[in-house]
Image (spheres, rainbow, N blue to C red):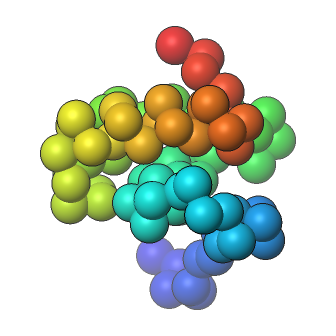
Amino acid sequence: MDKTPQHIRVPNDMCKQSNLDPTDVYVYSYLKTYMNGETFEAFPSMETLAKDAGVSKTTVNKAIKHLVCLLYTSDAA
């Protein structure tokens, strides 16, 4: 297995948003790890994101709703 560290890209303005909770950025980061590099789509389950991020499904759902509202991601479900 390749041990090369992988990186994600986070929009610069995301760090400057006063209306973003740090948990929103954290969940966004985990969501990006599932993104298809060609289609830019990601479809991990709420359970998977919650487990990976170490937060509840309720927290993931709240973060995604907030990210959709602020146009950092779309709600494809």
x, y percent for residue 46 = 31, 33
Q: How many marks?
A: 0
Of 12 and 47, which appears nearest the observer?
Answer: 12
Residue 63 seen anywhere in this rendered image of the structure: yes
**Which residue extends farthest bottom?**
4
* Residue at image location 36% in from the left, 36% down from the top: 62
**Which residue extends farthest top?**
77
**Which residue extends farthest front?**
18
x, y percent for residue 69 = 62, 31
Of 23 and 38, which appears nearest the observer?
Answer: 23
* Residue at image location 79% in from the left, 34% down from the top: 39
* Residue at image location 66% in from the left, 27% down from the top: 74
Judge left or right: residue 27 versus residue 5: left
Of 8 and 23, which appears nearest the observer?
Answer: 23
Q: Is residue 6 above or below residue 31?
A: below
x, y percent for residue 72 = 69, 43
x, y percent for residue 75 = 59, 21
Q: Is residue 14 above or below residue 65?
A: below
Judge left or right: residue 67 versus residue 40: left
Residue 9 seen anywhere in this rendered image of the structure: no
Q: Is residue 56 above or below residue 6?
A: above
Of 31 and 55, which appears nearest the observer?
Answer: 55
